[in-house]
Image (tube, rainbow, N blue to C red):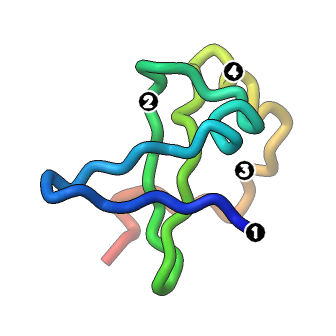
Amino acid sequence: MSDTATLSSKFQISIPKAVREGQGWQAGQELVFIRKGKGVLVMPVPDRELLRGIAKGADTTDYRDRTERF
């Protein structure tokens, strides 16, 4: 059976312990909520250092500049 949580009257939820431990989430960690149809994807916000170099070697041909947007 999957873990569940109840939305409080203050629109807060407690993430079940099994989920927190399984994902390695810690108190105070920032999370992002991404709407997916009728559901929501919850993910930790990555550190900027972890994103450094993520686009290294990306193909920049056919790149659209902001001035070309409608």
Residue at (52% x, 76% y) in the render: 36
Q: CA distance from mark 3 to mark 2?
A: 31 Å
Q: Residue at x 37, y 71 (%)?
A: 69
Residue found at the far left of this picture: 10
Q: Earlier in the sequence, mark 2 or mark 4?
A: 2
Disc number lying in front (2 or 4): 2
Check disc 4 and give the amino acid type: Leu
Between the residue at mark 1 and the residue at mark 4, the CA separation in whole angstroms equals 34 Å
Q: CA distance from mark 3 to mark 4?
A: 22 Å
Residues tagged 3 and 4 counted as in contact (Cβ below 8 A) = no
**Disc number for residue 60:** 3
Mark 4 sits on what residue? 50
Q: Identify whether 10 is placed above or below 34.
A: above
In the rendered image, residue 47, in percent from the top left (x then y), is placed at 57, 21
* Residue farthest to the front, as pictured: 1
Q: Is tag 1's residue or tag 4's residue first in the polypeptide sequence? A: 1
Identify the residue under disc 2. 30
Q: Viewer-nearest of labels 1 and 2?
A: 1
Amino acid type at mark 3:
Thr
Position of residue 57 measured from the top left corner of the image (x, y, whole percent): 85, 36
Which amino acid, by three-letter code, is at mark 2? Glu
Q: CA distance from mark 1 to mark 2?
A: 27 Å
Q: Is residue 7 above or below residue 58?
A: below
| Residue matched to label 1 | 1
- Marks 3 and 1: which is nearer the front? 1
**Residue 24, percent from left and from top:** 71, 27
Residue in the foreground of this view, choosing between 12 and 32: 12
Q: Quadrant of the N terminus?
A: bottom right
